[in-house]
Image: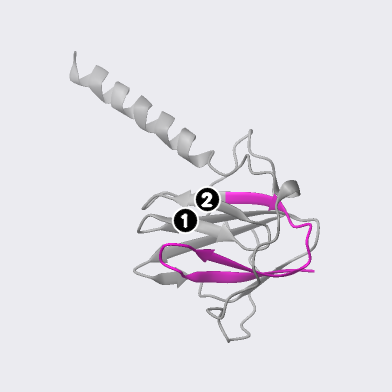
Amino acid sequence: MSVRTRTSTALAAGVLTALLVTGCGQGDDPSGATPSTAPTSAAPSSAATATAPASSASPTPSASTPAVDREIVVTIAKRRINPPTGRVTVDKGELVRITVTSDVSDELHVHGYDLGARLPAGTPGSVEFRADKTGLFEVETHETELVLFQLVVR
């Protein structure tokens, strides 16, 4: 097998892997989700409010990815959250996508909607749902127990 053939094969395998990983979490059906417990005392006490419009730094949706009303992108590196923990407000009925990339393997969890996604180290994980419940919901990681932000649905 030539070097060119091996390189092409490796490239094709990498693209296929990336396509399979990015599809994670899109099949979650929030309509049957049951509320989880109320936010824990680990919630930040600051009243910092941040609205997160769709970020141009996030991946461009493909033809098979439905358009979302609000995309929230979070990165975790050395237990530091970017953007810093705060509140993100969305309107009831909006289609929301939360994408998190962590430098360590973890699990993303959206309280109140009981949605989650695996977060392999260095690979984005996403949840997508219709914000059909009003209230204040914590979005956190389970293994590292980091509160990423509080989602306010009005």
Disc 2 on helix, strand or loop?
A: strand
* Residue 5 place in picture, x, y as percent: 26, 17
Q: Which residue is labeled 1 in the image?
A: 107
Type of the residue with mark 2: Ala
Magenta segment: 127-154
The local crowd at label 1, few if under 14, some if 14 to 19, many if 20 or more residues have their Cα within 10 Å, is some
Question: Which numbered tag is attached to residue 117?
Answer: 2
Of callouts 1 and 2, which one flags the residue occurring earlier in the amino acid sequence? 1
* Residue 59 place in picture, x, y as percent: 53, 48
Residue 90 visible in the shown view: yes
Which residue extends farthest bottom? 46
Disc 1 on helix, strand or loop?
A: strand
Left or right position of 2 against 38: left
Colour scheme in use: one colour
Question: Which numbered tag is attached to residue 64?
Answer: none
Type of the residue with mark 1: Glu
The vertical placement of 37 against 62, above or below, is below
The vertical placement of 41 against 135, above or below, is below
Residue at point 52% right, 69% down? 148
